[in-house]
Image: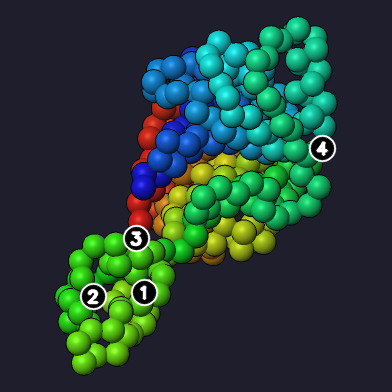
Amino acid sequence: MNLEAFILGCGGMMPLPQRHLTSVLLRREGELFLFDGGEGTQVSLRRLELRWKKISAIFVSHTHADHVTGIPGLLMLSSQVDRDDPLYIYGPPRIAEYIESNRRVLDMYINYQIVVKEIAEPGVVHRGEGFRIRAFPLRHTKPCYGYTLEEDGRPGVFYPEKARELGIPMGPLWSRLQAGENVEIPPGPGEPGRVIHPREVLGPPRSGRKFSFVTDSLYFPEIAGEVAGSDLLVCEGMFEKDLEESALEKKHMTAEQAARIAAAGGVRKLALIHYSPRYTEQNLKGLLAEARRVFPGTVLTRDRMVEPIEFID
């Protein structure tokens, strides 16, 4: 099952010609999840030829303009195609007011159900087949949440030779064992019936994948526990280390602080996002260098970059 992150916009505060505002789309097989929707979100969706009607849920970190101004247009765009499934929108207090006021003032034509759920406390906010999406609090100038998508664990590797040794015929029984079910072998001539347990033909259980999204927040060490074990952590690295005091005042993070979170959380890859508009493309290399001194597995996000998230076993 494919899992991919599409960076729709990597900028913070204001859009630049080659840098839309922060937005990340996660595609899990055919289902799409949008994390924030800054200005320019629709442009990147179109250029990447992603089917926006497949977006089943939007997860908003907070209601600052550079994270939500792309959402109203997306809601109107979705009314131009047939849509039977509801669209879920999750976010902090007042996200419902933001969505409803835009619908009213812009006189939006909406031909599908929009379900807005304001997050009252940390925990799982959305579930699907084989995964869950969890929200956790960040510390910004207004209520703000980070998110993780975590897949359920998978059964271990199936060993056909072990199944054959146990006399299990190839076919539906193999599939059931691979799915973690016990199977019963009926009695044969001179042999009693038997129950075969999955552990007899499978290797050790394997993990699912984990994606984390963190922006905007000042640095605090507890974030590492929330994103621990992520295969991909998309995290703001808005400023260079020399501006750490300014970052603290504005409740943002430096690239180095994002790297400290990644290192402490044991993540596989850190993708920096939400850059200050003060940094040119050349300047961003300085942010990357500061982060890599702490966490070598750091990359810079760019608009319309695609990051596959692979199984590790």
CA gap, disc 4 to disc 2? 55 Å
Give the mark, 4 or 2, whose residue is nearer the N terminus. 4
Q: Secondary structure at mark 2?
A: loop
Mark 4 and mark 1 in contact? Answer it, CB < 8 Å.
no
- Residue 80 in which image quadrant: top right
Give the mark, 1 or 2, whose residue is nearer the N terminus. 2
CA gap, disc 2 to disc 3? 29 Å
CA gap, disc 1 to disc 2? 9 Å
Name the residue that disc number 2 marks: 168
Is residue 203 shown to the viewer in this render?
Answer: no
Tell me which amino acid carries mark 1. Answer: Val
Who is closer to the viewer here, 252 or 132?
132
Mark 4 and mark 2 in contact? Answer it, CB < 8 Å.
no
CA gap, disc 3 to disc 4? 37 Å
Mark 1 and mark 2 in contact? Answer it, CB < 8 Å.
yes
Q: Residues within 10 Å of mark 3 (few under 14, many from 20)?
A: few
Name the residue that disc number 4 marks: 93
Q: Secondary structure at mark 1?
A: strand
Q: Secondary structure at mark 3?
A: loop
Camera-nearest label, 2 or 3: 2
Tell me which amino acid carries mark 3. Answer: Ile
Would residue 148 be found to the left or right of residue 162 on screen?
Answer: right
Name the residue located 36 percent from the left edge and 82 percent from the top edge: 195
Name the residue located 81 percent from the left edge and 18 percent from the top edge: 101
Name the residue that disc number 3 marks: 312
Q: Secondary structure at mark 4?
A: loop
